[in-house]
Amino acid sequence: MMKKRNGKQVKANATRIPREAKPPKEQMPVKKQEVFSSVCEKVILHNEEINETSVDYYLCKAVIAREAKEFKTERQAVLNLISFSDTPTTPLIQSALDQDERYQFSEQICTVFSLAKSDASLNPYMAIIRAFILSGTKQQYSTYFNCLMGISAFFNKDLPIFDINKLSNAQLLTFYEATHRILLDNSRQLNILEKLTQFTSHQVGEDTSQSLLFFESYFSIERNPKHSIEVARQFLSAPNLSTGHSNYLGSLALNTAQAAIRMADIEEADYWIEYVEDDDKAATLRRSIAKLEEKIGARTNHPLNPEHFSPTSLETISTKMLIILCAFVDGCGDDWGFRTLERSGKYIFPSDTMTEALFRSLVFGGYIKMSTSSFNALDDYTLEHFNEILWTAKFHLNIIGIADSRLMALPLLLEELDRRKDKKEVAWQIRMLITTGYFHSAFEYYLGNVNEQWAREFTLNEATTERINESALSGKDLAYIARSSIRFTAGQHSIGSTNGNKHTCNILIGSINRYFDWVNEGRYSYNAFERSKAQPLLCSERLLEQIAGFTPEDIYNLPPLPQEIEEKESEEE
């Protein structure tokens, strides 16, 4: 059957089956996110209503405080998490770490929990504590540790209160292990790390860890190396609490070996070298030990080492050395030992050269010596300068039964000297020494006034020195020879009559000997000044006047010849 539609014929279907309609798609219910800070406010309110605190409470207080920028409250809340470090993670905290989709986190809180989640090796609570610290500014790092130690501003003025005494030693050590590298990795925070180390060590007492011992040793190694080494010895038996398996043994061994070498403790240094991981550094340490052994040998064999000198009996001291000793005790003796020659040795004998030589003879005779502590305190450079030690070091009497004090020792020494039958004979020998000293005194003075290189290089040769020492001329004659020969030589050098410094020095030697000849032969009219009243009285001169009656004027103005020799020469004339 055909039907007409709009003038067109179309075939009609005999049967028409209608299409089935598709069922509508099911709509998924939209989950409503709850703002995490709102959840935290509810937790805080609930805990405060029932007057209880929990780990969720402290975390929520920290979150709200971070968003409100109440950093003091945040620090105290975060540090309270330490006391829960050995408890299971609560569902709320776990969901926060996982950033559960049920909650909407602000950007700054999301940063905290992302940091904490990335610290997978740490205890979750320690990871959260680290995350709060690290998500702040570097300037805020130290404030957390100051708060832990109770030294931050307005500490515990508001809730939540943080009480360090509620933490167990294990919890505090766990915190130290988890956070100390935050300070270590920031060079500006090393002073806080030092304070934290001292504080933690004091808090935990005998409980400890390798990290804590390492830094306790490290921070004391300069100011107290002995203590540093003692701490280092505990390291090997202490537990390593590092979850990242960090090991400070290599650094500790290197630092301790170096400290032991500075303390000249070879045995201790040898022990720690075995734990130094760097072969090159270990080889350097072994070379340092070899040099140290050489230095120790040199120190042991040094002529001033007090171990060489056992106390001397007073009766065994020769009369000459006894007079010299009395002069030094009188001149620079102190309440304990001797004052240094540099300070008090000027007016004992006429010249520095003689004073030094006679003081050296007392040292080598074992009548005086340095204390062991003073000798050990000398550095290697000073040990090589013997004369400098004589002038600057403190020495002590080393005589059996004689106190190391001028007030007590001098009367006993003079009493012993008075008993000596040869004291007057020896007094003439000392007088000759003093007379010779006047040559050196004048020579040192006038040569020191010549500001020329040749004067600084000059030394008396052996033959001339022997002639001076054996001379029987008076002090004033010897002073004249010294003064005149230097003036002549300096004049020759100034007018260009010498060829170089060595030639000038030779001219001075020749001039000294010519003046000796002229004075001895009496063929030269010279102007030798007698002793001035302003000339200081020497300790040795005062002693000779007491022993033999020699006046200072006689010692300087007259030849040092015994009376019987003078009488014999007069008879021959």
Image: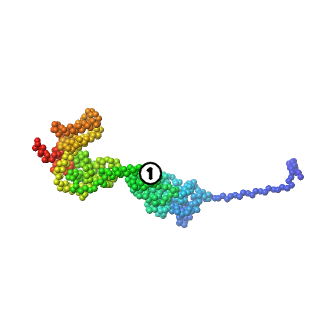
Q: Is any part of residue 91 visible from this angle?
A: yes
Assess disc 1: are there few (<14), some (14-19) or many (≥20) residues with their C-alpha within 10 Å of its C-alpha.
many
Question: In terms of depth relative to the viewer, which is nearer, 477 or 180?
Answer: 477
Vertical relation: 502 (above or below) 192: above
Residue 92 location, quadrant: bottom right
Residue 353 location, quadrant: top left
How far across and how far down the image is residue 260, in percent?
Answer: 40, 54
Q: Amino acid at mark 1?
A: Ala
Q: Is residue 391 left or right of residue 218?
A: left
Q: How many marks?
A: 1
Residue name at image x 26 percent, y 53 percent:
366
Vertical relation: 565 (above or below) 161: above
Question: In terms of depth relative to the viewer, which is nearer, 76 or 48?
Answer: 76
Quarter of the rendering occupied by the C terminus: top left
Q: Residue furthest top?
A: 496
Residue 44 location, quadrant: bottom right
Classify mark 1: helix, strand or loop: helix
Question: In terms of depth relative to the viewer, which is nearer, 83 or 35?
Answer: 83
Vertical relation: 499 (above or below) 102: above
Residue name at image x 24 percent, y 35 percent:
491
Residue name at image x 55 percent, y 56 percent:
119
Q: Which residue is denoted by mark 1 in the rendering?
A: 282
How far across and how far down the image is residue 344, in percent?
Answer: 26, 50
Question: In terms of depth relative to the viewer, which is nearer, 480 or 147?
Answer: 480
Q: Is any part of residue 327 visible from this angle?
A: no
How far across and how far down the image is residue 571, in percent?
Answer: 10, 44
Q: Which colour style is shown?
A: rainbow
How far across and how far down the image is residue 63, in percent?
Answer: 55, 58
Q: Residue furthest right?
A: 1
